[in-house]
Amino acid sequence: MKLENIIEQLSKFQNKKSTYSIAYCEQMEEGLTGLLLRHPKLRKVYDQEGNIFKLDLPEGIYIRYQGKFINTIKIEIRENFKILTFGHQNEYLEIDEDNYYDLKRLYYALMIVFQNTDLIEEYKELGEIAKKTAEQTSKTKEEILTDGDPKINSHIHSFFYNALINNSFYRRNDTDKKKRTYYIMLPEGICIKCRNKKYNSIIIEDEDKWYGKISLGYTVQNCYMFEDEIRYRSDEYTYDYNKIGPRKTDYTLLHKDEFIDFAVNPYETIKILKAIEIITATYPLEEMWMSCDETTSNPKKL
């Protein structure tokens, strides 16, 4: 299957999942806002544009939400709408409607502020109502795993193997005859950003023949043209002789992270594949250099 067809199919599933996720988040936001406005410990703060209400978590209690620690809930009431946010000090987060799981977990965590109030039964009822929508989201995730023949993740793996292994521009690790590792470098300093890191190489560990582990990595080419980077010393990706040492190998792998499959994180998978699609539209995979020595057809291992 071509990369554009894989992305199209993944996007279709993601859009379906997002529909249920948005429905869940909107349902939960409306219910939470209504209950919070009736909470006995809610305090009112005035500003020039409208009313602001805040509810603090019990002293010493924080909740992890959207990658941040929160201890305050804020509701802003304007003329025709209400804004529900969660935060700490002056940094507040709105609900991410594409991440129902985090909001679902937050709902259960906030049980501690409704416990021992007259609102606890209504709060539990809100959870049961929203649970039905959450089940639809989980069902869509299962469809992603089972729909089509072969499964969608198999399409992704097949693309990488067919495109990377079957052309001559790969690097092979022969230290273990039963395990082969293939690398492909993105061209001309181009990188993909994901998980707040930069990656310039795709790595396949052939652990199970045609269904091995795929990772993204940042690989430094240990040749003299890249040693010039040391003059900048600008960040953790800069070639550093003191860290890497003498040029014993052609490449040094600074870091790598396993490519999370579509069922776990569809948004991230689509983002990575779209970036690869853009890059390969200009630089076909078979033209991506893997060695500092352009005459080397079979570069050395790391």
Image (cartoon, rainbow, N blue to C red):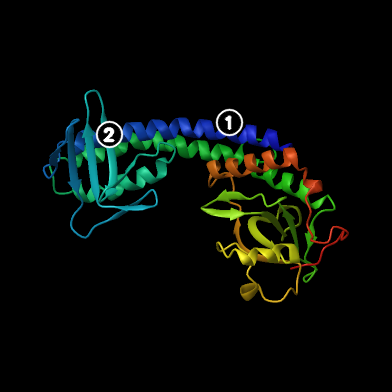
**69 relative to 120 in the view: left or right:** right
Instruction: Please state if 242 lies on the left or on the right of 177 as rendered.
Output: left
> Which of the two discs, 1 and 2, labels the residue nearer the N terminus?
1
Q: Is residue 268 above or below residue 69?
A: above
Q: Is residue 223 visible?
A: no
What is the total number of numbered labels drawn onto the structure image?
A: 2
The quarter of the displayed image where residue 229 is located? bottom right
Is there CB contact under 8 Å for labels 1 and 2? no
Depicted 197 relative to depicted 21: above or below: below
Q: Quadrant of the C terminus?
A: bottom right
SS label for mark 1: helix
Dot 2 alpha-carbon crowd within 10 angstroms: few under 14, some 14 to 19, many 20 or more:
some
Percent position of residue 210, x then y: 75, 53
Name the one closer to the observer, 298 or 214.
Answer: 298
Q: Mark 1 to mark 2: distance in Å?
A: 30 Å
- Give me the disc on residue 83: 2
Q: Which of pointers 1 and 2 indicates the residue nearer the eye?
A: 2
Amino acid under disc 2 = Ile
- Identified at 58% across, 65% down, the residue is 233
Between residue 91 and residue 28, name the one nearer to us. Answer: 91
- Residue type at numbered disc 1: Lys
Left or right relative to 188: residue 53: left
Q: Is residue 299 above or below residue 103?
A: below
Residue 228 spot, x, y in % from top left:
68, 64
Q: How many residues crowd mark 1 within 10 Å: few (<14), some (14–19), many (20+)? A: few
Going by the picture, which residue comes out furthest to the front?
231
Residue 117, quarter of the rendered image: top left
Residue at the image position 78 percent from the left and 71 percent from the top: 175
Instruction: Locate residue 127, reporting x and y percent.
Output: 30, 39
Question: Circle 2 — which element?
Answer: strand
**Residue matched to label 1:** 12
**In this view of the protein, which residue sits in the foreground, 8 or 169?**
169
